[in-house]
Image: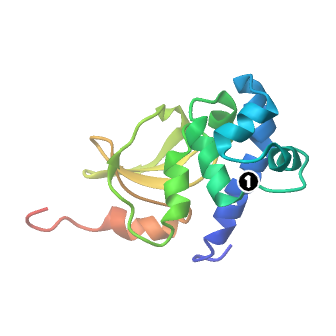
Amino acid sequence: MGKNDHSTERQTFIAACDAKVKLVRVEAGLTQDAMAHALGLSKKTLVDIEKGRRTLGWTGSVALCLVFGDSEVIAGTFGGTPVDLIQTAAFAGQPVHRRRVTGSPTWWTAVMENDRYILQQNVISQHYRIITHDKTRIASAFDLDELLPIFNHPLTEGQ
């Protein structure tokens, strides 16, 4: 995958959501009618997605992950809450909004650490993020090379 080929990450995310939508529905104990309503879809569209004839697309996939954010199926698919992954794909190539990270550290492995930052990789999705020692996300990307200049940038006076 090329350094700036961010559409691949979105397509991979969407395909994973398409493959898990029925498992999430069953896990939640919902009928197809109730699941379709929760996602803002028609029952026919949901049936087609579950049978592999249609796709949730980007918006439907994001809705699935946010509406069913406490799903064990989703956590196991994406390595914890997929919010960081979604934002990484949504803002690919752009600065990431700083926010405090939440969720289990089980899904993250420290790759590098310095006096300012911890560079981590998600064990399932394999995307990277830089967080401060007080757990504020600074940046995230699918390509480690995009984050290294930020991670290695020396402190200047006033920072």
Q: Which residue is denoted by mark 1 in the rendering?
A: 56
Q: Is residue 20 left or right of residue 142?
A: right
The N terminus lies in quadrant: bottom right
> Above or below — where is 155 with respect to 66?
below
Where residue 74 appears, x then y in whole percent? 66, 37
Q: Is residue 99 left or right of residue 7?
A: left
Which residue of the protein is positioned furthest toward the left in this rendering? 158
Where residue 144 appears, x then y in whole percent? 51, 64
Determine which quarter of the picture holds residue 78: top right
Q: Is residue 70 visible?
A: yes
> Above or below — where is 6 with respect to 138?
below
Q: Is residue 123 visible?
A: no
Helix, strand or loop at mark 1: loop
The C terminus lies in quadrant: bottom left
Which residue of the protein is positioned furthest toward the top in this rendering? 29
> Above or below — where is 9 with respect to 120?
below
Where residue 66 appears, x then y in whole percent? 56, 41
Residue drawn at (61%, 42%) of the image:
65
Q: Is residue 22 left or right of residue 151?
A: right
Q: Nearer the viewer, residue 107 or 59?
A: 59
Q: Nearer the viewer, residue 78 or 37?
A: 37
Residue drawn at (66%, 51%) of the image:
61
Residue drawn at (82%, 50%) of the image:
45
Q: How many residues crowd around disc 1 within 10 Å: few (fewer than 14), some, or many (20 or more)?
A: many
Amino acid type, label 1: Leu
